[in-house]
Structure formats: structure tokens, C-alpha cells
Image (tube, rainbow, N blue to C red):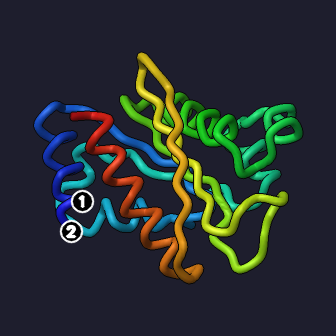
Amino acid sequence: MEQVARVHNLFKSRGLTLSVAESCTGGLIAHLITILPGASKFFYGGIITYFTECKVKVLGVRRETIKKNGVVSADTAMEMAWRVREIMNTDLGVSTTGNLGPEALEGKDIGLVYFGLSSRSKTICRKKIFSGSREENKEEAALYALELIGDFMA
């Protein structure tokens, strides 16, 4: 997978570190990163916070953020990315939160995923709607996250 190789090359060549906070992707981003050897040189690890309360208790996402914007939101994604970066003390933190289907969540579209990216200098969010099955959406979201990481760090 070219996205995985690109992330490996970028982080290893620059001596940077990466951590992930995954919700809807359930650890798939971490899995993909560790497919290639050498991930331990830059990938510190991931936190899977599927349950809302886990986002609050483990990552430290503010309850107010979730109450005001929902779990599936740009603000939650950015806070997740920022918090995992802080917790693991990495150069980049990445997060996913979304609704892969098959039913609507918080009145939001099926296939809607927010991606948070947090470096030491800025935190951003990207939004994408996927249109496949739950399994396809999960895989596409994880691959898209890797693509975003590469673009963000390029």
C-alpha cells in the first residue's frame, strides 16, 4: 500500500513521531502502519476510544465538546488528535470519529467521518463521506487517514 510506505518514509526520514486516536476505524490505522517493518522507529502507538465515555476518561476529550457538537464532529476529532499527541508526546496525533453505518448516529449521515490532525504548531480537521458498506467505509477511512497524514507532513 503506497499510503503506508509514504508515511513510513516521511516519518523515518525526518525523525518524527506519530500516534493515533481511533474511534470508528477501530485500530485499523495502527494495523496498517505496522504492516511494514520499521514502524517502531516512529509509531508510538494508538488509543482506540470507541465508547464515548472512553474518549472522555482516557483521552481527556471535554464533555462539553461532545455535548455541544456530538461525538461525530470536527471539534471532537481535533480534540482527540490533540490529546493523543499530548499524551504520547509525539510530533503528530491523528484521530478518526464517525458513523460507518448501517444506521444514522446523532442524526448525522451514514459514512460521515471526521479526521483530526494535530502537530506541535497546528490542529486541523478534514471531513469525508464514504458511500460503501460498513466494512468498506472503515477500510476507506483508514486509507484516507494515511493519505491525510502524508499530505499534512509533506
Q: Secondary structure at mark 1?
A: helix
Please state if 152 lies on the left or on the right of 137 as rendered. left
Q: Secondary structure at mark 2?
A: loop
Front in this rendered view, residue 117 or 47: 117
Q: Which residue is mark 1?
A: 4
Q: Please give left or right for residue 47 compared with residue 43 in the image.
A: right
- Residue 62 on image: x %, y %: 79, 32
- The image shows residue 115, relative to residue 100, as above or below, that is above
* Residue 47 at x, y percent in the picture: 56, 52
Quadrant of residue 61 within the rendered picture: top right
Residue, disc 2: 1
Position of residue 54 measured from the top left corner of the image (x, y, whole percent):
75, 52
Residue at the (68%, 68%) spot, across then down: 110
Q: Amino acid at mark 1?
A: Val
- Categorize mark 1 by other alpha carbons within 10 Å: few (<14), some (14-19), many (20+): many
Vertical position of residue 103 compared to residue 72: above or below: below
Q: CA distance from mark 2 to mark 1?
A: 6 Å
Question: Contact, CB < 8 Å: mark 2 with mark 1?
Answer: yes
